[in-house]
Amino acid sequence: MDSLLQASRKLGFLLDQNDVSGALRYLNGLTSFRFTALYRFDQEQLRNRFFFDRMNPESASTEDIPLEASYCIYVRQNRGPFLVADSLRDERVRGHAKQATVRSYCGVPLIDAQGWMYGSVCHFDFEPHPLQESDVLLLDEVAHLLSRDAQGTPDLRVRA
């Protein structure tokens, strides 16, 4: 596996080339999670912008869903990272709509230069996964790189 510094440089290069899909594909290869995605908050909807599924790499997107039906709602509510190693053993997600299906999740917020939270970037899987510090660090790096030039309309963002 690449070192964190090497991974950060590679992610920066891909994002400088506007290859967000390539960056998510690369990022996914550094983790054990099946899915890596970038979502935009749109009021109470979660809009998929970029998506990578290692079992189905030709799939470029997933359905938009209500924010409350995703673990990204916790990223938005906490205004920070949210991690779940095994949803069936995590009291914080008891009763959540995806508790039985999305067993593991690691997500961080996307915040623009003005401090507006406009989405999340995350890994998730149908299987439980031990959480790795490097997963959060690299998601934070991607969020930082994506957010440095982020533009969007205020009605699609949440004040951080």
Image (cartoon, rainbow, N blue to C red):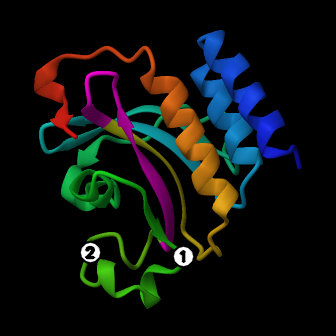
Vertical side of 15 occupied by 75: above or below: below
Residue 57 in sight in this render: no
Residue 5: image quadrant is top right
> Dots 2 and 1: beta carbons under 8 Å?
no
Q: Residue at x 77, y 27 (%)?
A: 10
Q: x, y percentage for residue 144?
A: 50, 31
Q: x, y percentage for residue 60?
A: 55, 31
Give the residue at mark 2. Answer: 96
Q: Identify the element where label 1 is drawn.
A: loop
Q: Nearer the viewer, residue 47 or 118?
A: 118
Q: Residue at x 34, y 69 (%)?
A: 98
Q: In the image, 41: left or right of 133?
A: left
Q: Identify the element where label 2 is drawn.
A: loop
N-term-proximal mark, 2 vs 1: 1
Q: In the image, 105: left or right of 24?
A: left
Q: x, y percentage for residue 112?
A: 33, 25
Magenta stretch contains residue 74: no
Residue range highlighted in magenta: 103-118
Give the residue at mark 1. Answer: 85
Which numbered mark, 2 or 1, is in the foreground of this view? 1
For the residue marked with disc 2, what is the amino acid?
His
Q: Residue at x 76, y 46 (%)?
A: 29
Q: In the image, 140: left or right of 12?
A: left
Magenta stretch contains residue 105: yes
Q: Residue at x 65, y 62 (%)?
A: 133
Q: In the image, 37: left or right of 47?
A: right
Residue 118: image quadrant is top left
Q: x, y percentage for residue 26?
A: 73, 36
Vertical side of 156 occupied by 82: above or below: below
